[in-house]
Amino acid sequence: MCGICGIIQPENRKPIPENYLSSMCRTIIHRGPDDEGFHLERDVALGVRRLSIIDLETGHQPLSNEDGSIWTAYNGEIYNFPQLRKELIQLGHTFKTKTDTETIVHGYEQWGTDFIKKTNGMFSISIWDRNNRNLFLIRDRLGIKPLYYSLCRDGTLVFGSELKAVLAHPKVERRLNMQALDLFLTLEYIPAPFSIFENIFKLPAGSLLAYKNGTIKISKYWDLQQNEPEKMKESIRSPESLQDELFFLLKESVKSRLISDVPLGAFLSGGIDSSAIVGLMHTLGVSPINTFSIGFEYDTYNELEHAQRIAEKFSTEHKEFILKPDILQLTEKLILHLDEPFGDFSIFPTYLVSKTARDSVKVILSGDGGDELLAGYEHYQAQKLSRNPLMWPLHKLMPSLIKKFPPSPKKKGLWNKMQRYCRGVEMDKRLRHLRWMMFLSTLEKKSLYSENFRENLKGITSLHEREPFQSIFERMNDYDETNGELFLDLNTYMVDDILVKVDRMSMA
């Protein structure tokens, strides 16, 4: 994995100073400690900090095609690159390295930007097409790899894997985005395309940005599509058949992620998701399997016993780290790596388990995404419960019932669950399961915000009435209740909370 950054300006300007690019690269050195590379032309500059995973010796970036007319700076992995490489060689392309990076320049050379539809991977990609004077930025389908950009007043485009790389360019303005701050106080994360700064944006997952001479155009190259009703009828299958296909797909997914020239391992919490990943690694013959877990001094949060049982079952090389109160000393360091407000406390264990793993491996597999695939979160259960007519009479009684129970120190104790449920039930039903995920409600924000802040927001509106949520809520109508909830999380919570946490803390 790597960090990328770059600059492109309209034609016939003064040459881009090299120190602009080097300053940007320095801010993301933690993402790629193994190598640094620049490519500079008069109006274009591409930079890479590389963490070497495949073809350690000849995988230097930025990388070009044979005549230097197409360049790429790229972060991530393309898992099906051996198949793409073989196809491109058959079509007459010549490769000089064994990296997945080279399939990008030759794939673009052969198919244009449609090459991205042939890829299976996680990535943020920049491509400079010198002959056509086009620069493209592409982010993977689910937004696993981050990519920020800013179009400056003079038409210069600045981009990078992290906010700090974009901010290192002197032309990028630094104005607080009030809408983004409001979204953070609502959700404890800032959803794409927003960032905490007005003129800096996240490229949404599954999107392609095209730049030419001072203007940009953003388009979706991939989106989750709902089957037509007739196709749905044709695809109705037995639970056993679906189970077999899910197992096959998970196995193939894990198998493709084992392509590496460096040691790899897995995070192991003891839950279903990470345990399944470790079990599949064992089935695929990985030996030894390096597993890493985080534990807590308090039993309420501690799941080490479950992780230990899985590690023992699959004979893994298991390492553990116990989270202690002095963890708060890390706060300043982790804020530095987040760049913008982020309220998910699990950044602490994620950082520490990543740090523990780093001493043994360079690549880690995790179970993130399983809850969004199989509806594992409690807020799905709460949403389903709230739709049950038998519960409606109880909604008015529950607040008084809660007072009869003593408060519970357990995070998932009955008292805490009932309290969260009651709070969500009181909110607008049109918010769907977001009711159980919100930090501040609309009513709470009205009492908290100053008049000046409310004026800057042009009024406080509910999430379902504003972008990016409004479009997502409209699309949810294409699905049944449960799949609609999954679609919502796939496009918001997973990409802008879970994946942000894992990326920043594993790269810190």
Image (cartoon, helix red, strand yellow):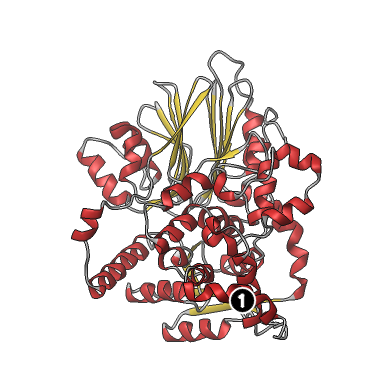
Q: Is residue 322 above or below residue 478?
A: below
Q: Is residue 90 above or below residue 353?
A: above
Circle 1 sits in a helix, a strand or a loop, which is it?
A: helix
Q: Is residue 323 above or below residue 478?
A: below
Give whichever of 442, 281 is nearer the camera.
Answer: 442
Give whichever of 409, 495 is nearer the camera.
Answer: 409
Estimate the x, y position of residue 468 in percent, counting from the top left: 53, 44
Give whichever of 38, 449 is nearer the camera.
Answer: 449
Q: Residue at x 59, y 73 (%)?
A: 395
Estimate the x, y position of residue 75 in percent, counting from the top left: 49, 46
Crowding at label 1, few (<14), some or many (≥20) Cα neighbours within 10 Å?
some
Mark yes or no: residue 35 visible. no
Residue, disc 1: 417
Dividing the picture into quadrants, the one containing residue 439 is bottom right
Considering the image in quadrants, where does the C terminus appear?
Answer: bottom right
Mark yes or no: residue 474 visible. yes
Estimate the x, y position of residue 495 in percent, counting from the top left: 51, 53
Q: Amino acid at mark 1?
A: Lys
Q: How many marks?
A: 1
Q: Residue at x 54, y 19 (%)?
A: 10
State left or right for residue 435 relative to residue 56: right
Residue extending furthest toward the top: 12
Q: Residue at x 48, y 55 (%)?
A: 488
State left or right for residue 286 relative to residue 160: left
State left or right for residue 237 relative to residue 121: left
Give whichever of 202, 377 is nearer the camera.
Answer: 377
